[in-house]
Image (cartoon, grey):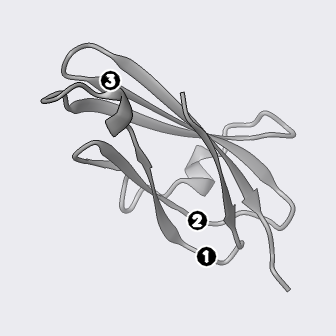
């Protein structure tokens, strides 16, 4: 499915969203979600340090909202957002997260 890019500075803690409306039928809702972050160089799961658990990722209508935090200048992470819907669809979106200290 969709693919995008996010640039974030190491200090920032910000909310981001991923909209699945183009993939959902009228009346279909998101019933389950997961957000996973993986360091693009090492392959290590970085979800616990990059994706905030307070607040945890959540669904608002057809959109998944998640908060990103931490990171070190120069890091690159893959964010994988997976949802299951009320009609049984399993959808996935990927985002590239670049940690960039702007000077």
Q: Secondary structure at mark 1?
A: loop
- Assess whether mark 2 and mark 1 are in contact (beta carbons under 8 angstroms): yes
Where is residue 71 drawn, in percent x and y? 72, 63
**Picture residue at 33% right of the left edge, 46% below the top:** 63
The answer, for residue 57, to whether it is visible in the render is no
Q: Nearer the viewer, mark 3 or mark 2?
A: 3
Is 85 on the left or on the right of 92, as rendered? Answer: left
Instruction: Find out whether the residues at labels 3 and 2 contact each other: C-beta distance under 8 Å.
Output: no
Q: Residues within 10 Å of mark 1 (few under 14, many from 20)?
A: few
2 relative to 86, above or below:
below
Which quadrant: the N terminus?
Answer: top right
Q: Label 3 neighbourhood size at 10 Å, few (<14), some (14-19), many (20+)?
A: some
Residue at left 78%, top 33%? 43
Residue 13, image x and y in percent? 54, 72
Q: What's the mark number on residue 12?
A: 1
Q: CA distance from mark 1 to mark 3?
A: 30 Å
- Residue, disc 2: 69
CA separation in Å, label 1 and label 2: 6 Å
Q: Is residue 36 visible in the rendered structure shown here? A: yes
Secondary structure under badge 3? strand
Residue at numbered disc 3: 84
Decide if residue 103 is on the left or right side of residue 81.
right
């Amino acid at each position: 499915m969709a693919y995008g890019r996010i640039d974030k500075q190491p200090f920032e803690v910000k909310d981001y969203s991923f909209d699945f409306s183009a993939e959902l039928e009228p009346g279909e809702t998101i019933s389950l979600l997961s957000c996973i972050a993986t360091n693009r160089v090492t392959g290590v799961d970085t979800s616990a340090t990059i994706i905030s658990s307070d607040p945890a990722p959540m669904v608002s209508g057809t959109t998944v909202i998640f908060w990103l935090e931490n990171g070190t200048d120069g890091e690159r992470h893959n964010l994988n957002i997976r949802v299951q819907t009320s009609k049984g669809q399993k959808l996935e979106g990927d985002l590239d997260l670049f940690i960039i200290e702007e000077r």
